[in-house]
Amino acid sequence: MLLSTKNDWFGNIRGDLLSGLVVALALIPEAIAFSIIAGVDPKVGLYASFCIAVVISFVGGRPGMISAATGAMALVMVTLVKEHGLEYLLAATILTGFIQIVLGYIGVAKLMSFVARAVVVGFVNALAILIFMAQLPELTNVTWHVYALTLAGLGIIYLFPYVPKIGKILPSPLVTIVVITIFAVISGWDVRTVGDMGELPDTLPIFLLPDVPMNFETLRIIFPYAFALAIVGLLESFMTATIVDELTDTKSDKHREAKGQGIANIASGCIGGMAGCAMIGQSVINVKSGGRGRLSTFVAGFFLLIMVVFLSDIISIIPMAALVAVMIMVSIGTFDWGSIKGLKTLPLSTNIVMLGTVAVTVGTHNLALGVVTGVLLASLFFANKISHFMYCDTSYDESTNTKTYKFVGQVFFNSADKFYETFDFKEVLDKVIIDLNRAHFWDISAVYALDKAVIKFRREGTKVEVIGQNEASKTIIDRFGVYDKPEEIEKVIGGH
């Protein structure tokens, strides 16, 4: 345990320090932009990003993952801020944290098992597109100087790693930011800078509780927003953790991450910050720049605060073109280019799930809605596919005028009608045997189909015997089935 903790913090000191600095620089315009989206002062997003990154570095379940104020969360809180103001947002942020802690203890991370690979790929591609789209305002209605600096920045990002010796030591995004800033200052080009995004805070955050009435009416107002923030935050954090797991070939503790996100949001709300969650863009920057441990996340948050409060004069002159180049690199690196090739080779259902996730996420700018859409599509396709694996073999014994139906496969809501329609109720038989040795009943729909078939046969004067149920099927049939319960059959037939 001690060795693992030491490795998480000090196993990659140089890489974590440099990557943390790069992420801190990239967080500044993002935090300001997300504050503007939410309709609050820029310092609300900056304080939140500092606090959440620092706290999650200690209590999170995914070393090297960056959490801060995010666009997905900002979109959820817009209406709350507009109708009730900042104080109610801070209260909702604290409540969001408590909800996430509770969800963490009840094992909400297990729901990730329902997220198909196609949904993850769609989520990643949608985020890459959204990250790129977020840069477009900085590239429209601008002078040629902005395009020149952006292209130069991309050139440095992709070519600097090939420079002998230092190319592998310094993160190319950091070099890009420094070089482009120095050039812009020396050349005197009039381009948009970080300082133009909004006023940077000049004081450290202080502890304060939201100034709202502590009553049921306040809870009624903030709970719907807090619950939505909790779900969106955990969903994006789990998805980002999965992606970072794959990038680093390591595992994360998503139950701990859920609780950690909750603690971080409570802390953020108590210093005047908005709710946040994991950020895929900054997490990818961190990993690509060499960050692997908790130190990188801590440094990102710590440097962010130091820079915006004490070095604001320097930070404010960084051209937005340099940060745009870094974010374009992130979008290119985030997009799963293999998924385009997969459109020709993968099953149609897989492609529809992936493209559906991308379309809804990009169309609504709501990551949670996109993922939920993908999960629903994947579930529907899976249910449809499994229903086709159910079939029936029949045999007839002429000497006893008995017909045996041997079912094989899964009987559930999507195959229950097929199960019922297999029977031929027009045949005049003395006995019917329904053999379920190789079948499995999953739900009430399956039991209802069996009841309907047995009762219909018996109405025609045919004896029916159901055999071969496995333990799970027998349990659900005994509990909910009525074909062997005369008093229940009377209720069904009598319409009660």
Image: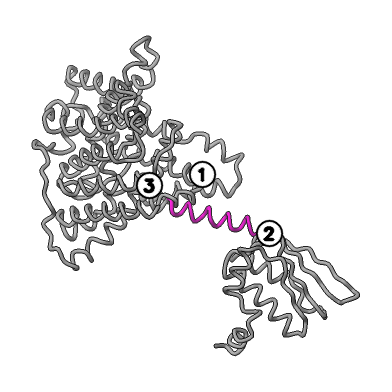
Which SS does the magenta portion mostly show?
A: helix
Residues under labels 3 and 2: Cα distance? 35 Å
Q: Which quadrant would the C terminus be assigned to in this image?
A: bottom right
Of the pair 269 and 433, the residue shown nearer to us = 433
Q: Amino acid at mark 3?
A: His
Residue 382, picture quadrant: bottom right
Instruction: Residue 442: give its label.
Output: none
Dot 3: element: helix
Dot 1: element: helix
- Give the labeled residue for mark 2: 409
- Residue 474 x %, y %: 63, 68
Q: Residue lying furthest front in this view?
A: 2
Q: How many marks?
A: 3
Q: Reading the chain from its start, which is encountered first: label 3 or label 2?
A: 3
Q: Reading the chain from its start, which is encountered first: label 1 or label 2?
A: 1
- Residue 484 x %, y %: 66, 80
Residue 256, picture quadrant: top left
Of the pair 395 and 35, the residue shown nearer to us = 395
Instruction: Residue 117: give its label.
Output: 1
Residue 36 falls left or right of residue 251? left
Count residues near mark 1 (Cα–Cα under 10 Å), then give few for <14, some for 14-19, many for 20+: some
Q: Residue lying furthest bottom in this view?
A: 494
Between disc 3 and disc 2, the foreground one is 3
- Give the labeled residue for mark 3: 255
Q: Is residue 270 above or below residue 297?
A: below
Q: Is residue 272 above or below residue 311?
A: below
Residue span colored magenta: 371-387
